[in-house]
Image: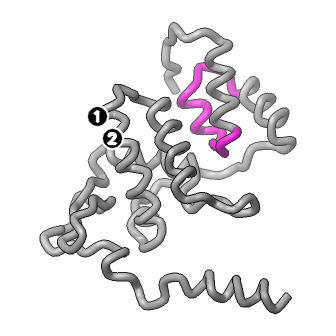
């Protein structure tokens, strides 16, 4: 793996790593976005989270972003990211972090709940857009821009908000009923 040469100070790299860790970034993301060594990142992660970072591969398929609920959340994030890169002159990991912060402000996950879209998935989503595996398509009913597969036909695309799946939201109702019963 080739490390990026950076004029950013080590203190700035540590600050960036801390912010990424606080938002739940995986170790692989930290290694790619900072110039800090793996050992230093492991120490930082353990110091901040109190546990070792999770192991395993990063998301590698576009399919997750195309299912009903993840698509809505991914679309909120990507529209925010696009706006920031086009109008606020923010790029790279700074744009991803700012868009993710704004996404969290909009979806308001409860303190004990994980957001639907993790920072690592958001970072992966931007990479899928950059590689042209995913793109925006417009809903023919509401006109909103939604994440879609670049190779699919989109002439008559209807988003998951205009045409909700029949089981959409059922899991939340079951969860609330179980909480009420307890």
Left or right relative to 147: residue 178: right
Marks 2/1 in contact by CB < 8 Å: the verdict is: yes
- Circle 2 packing at 10 Å, graded few (<14), some (14-19), many (20+), is some
The residue stretch that appears in magenta: 22-38
Q: Position of residue 19 (x, y in %)?
A: 65, 32
The question of residue 11 being in magenta is answered with no
**SS at badge 2:** helix
Left or right relative to 131: residue 24: right
Image: 164 above or below 52: below
**Going 66% across and 38% down the picture, which residue do you hit?**
27
**SS at badge 1:** helix
**Residue that badge 2 annotates:** 83
Q: Looking at this view, is 66 or 54 the one in front?
A: 66
**Residue that badge 1 annotates:** 86
Left or right relative to 68: residue 121: right
**Going 68% across and 13% down the picture, which residue do you hit?**
11
Q: Position of residue 142 (x, y in %)?
A: 24, 70
Q: Position of residue 127 (x, y in %)?
A: 40, 43
Q: Quadrant of the C terminus?
A: bottom right
Residue 154: which quarter of the image? bottom left
- Circle 1 packing at 10 Å, graded few (<14), some (14-19), many (20+), is few
Q: Looking at this view, is 58 or 160 the one in front?
A: 160
**Going 27% across and 62% down the picture, which residue do you hit?**
144
Image: 130 above or below 111: above
Residue 20: which quarter of the image? top right
Q: Which mark identifies residue 139?
A: none
- Total numbered circles: 2
């Amino acid at each position: 793996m080739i490390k990026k040469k950076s004029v950013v100070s080590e203190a700035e790299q540590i600050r960036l790593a801390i912010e990424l860790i606080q938002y739940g970034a995986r170790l692989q993301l930290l290694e790619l976005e900072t110039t800090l060594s793996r050992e230093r990142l492991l120490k930082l992660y353990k110091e901040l989270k109190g546990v070792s970072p999770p192991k395993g591969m990063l998301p590698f398929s576009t399919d997750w972003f195309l299912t009903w609920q993840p698509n809505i959340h991914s679309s909120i994030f990507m529209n925010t990211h696009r706006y920031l890169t086009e109008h606020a002159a923010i790029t790279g990991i700074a744009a991803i972090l700012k868009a993710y912060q704004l996404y969290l402000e909009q979806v308001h996950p409860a303190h004990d709940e994980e957001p639907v879209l993790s920072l690592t998935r958001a970072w992966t989503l931007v990479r899928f857009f950059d590689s042209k595996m995913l793109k925006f398509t417009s809903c023919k009913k509401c006109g909103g821009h939604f994440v879609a597969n670049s190779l699919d036909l989109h002439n008559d695309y209807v988003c998951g908000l205009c045409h909700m799946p029949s089981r959409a939201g059922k899991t939340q109702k079951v969860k609330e009923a179980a909480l009420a019963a307890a």
